């Protein structure tokens, strides 16, 4: 097995481990939001980008499982997912809107 195949397999395993944790986090956050604010989902920018992150990684795992994609195509999806995670984690705070604006950047 060459280096690129090893990295591809490692990426698949790491995303396969992280995806259920992301799913649990989104569900737990929704349950907590319902208790705190009376609504499971409010389309807050952070919630929306968390959903986008989940959809990108769901597409990645789906492509790997059903189409047996390997190599360039899933690597592009994983790279997009990496960028989306950073947008969700940091970029949304630049908007200054929503329930998840903590004001630590400005």
Image (cartoon, rainbow, N blue to C red):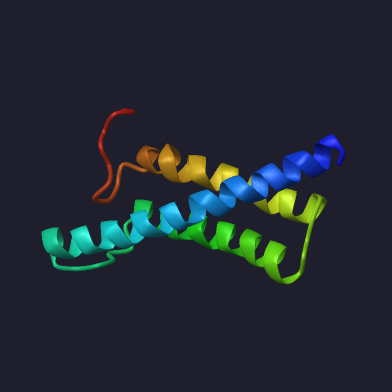
Query: In the picture provided, is 93 more to the left or to the right than 3?
Result: left
Residue in the image at 66% along x and 45% along y = 11
Splitting the image into 4 quarters, where does residue 42 fall? bottom left
- Report x, y in % for residue 6: 77, 40
Seen as rendered, the residue at the extreme front is 1
Camera-nearest residue between 66 and 79: 66
- Report x, y in % for residue 7: 74, 39
- Report x, y in % for residue 52: 49, 59
Seen as rendered, the residue at the extreme bottom is 66
With respect to residue 60, does 66 lie above or below? below
- How many tags in the picture? 0
Query: In the picture provided, is 47 more to the left or to the right than 58?
Result: left
With respect to residue 67, does 45 lie above or below? above
Splitting the image into 4 quarters, where does residue 31 fall? bottom left
Q: Quadrant of the C terminus?
A: top left
Residue in the image at 36% along x and 39% along y = 93
Residue in the image at 72% along x and 47% along y = 9
Query: In the picture provided, is 21 more to the left or to the right than 2?
Result: left
Splitting the image into 4 quarters, where does residue 47 fall? bottom left
Camera-nearest residue between 67 and 90: 67
Q: Quadrant of the N terminus?
A: top right
Residue in the image at 58% along x and 45% along y = 14
Camera-nearest residue between 45 and 53: 53
- Report x, y in % for residue 82: 58, 43
Seen as rendered, the residue at the extreme right is 2
């Amino acid at each position: 097995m060459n280096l690129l195949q090893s990295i591809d397999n490692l990426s698949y395993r790491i995303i396969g481990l992280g995806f259920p944790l992301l799913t649990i986090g989104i569900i737990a956050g929704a349950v907590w939001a319902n208790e705190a604010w009376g609504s499971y989902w409010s389309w807050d920018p952070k919630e929306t980008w968390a959903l986008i992150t989940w959809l990108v990684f769901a597409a990645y795992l789906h492509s790997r499982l059903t189409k047996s994609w390997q190599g360039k195509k899933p690597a592009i999806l994983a790279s997009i997912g990496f960028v989306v995670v950073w947008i969700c984690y940091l970029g949304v705070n630049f908007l200054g809107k929503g329930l998840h604006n903590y004001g630590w950047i400005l």
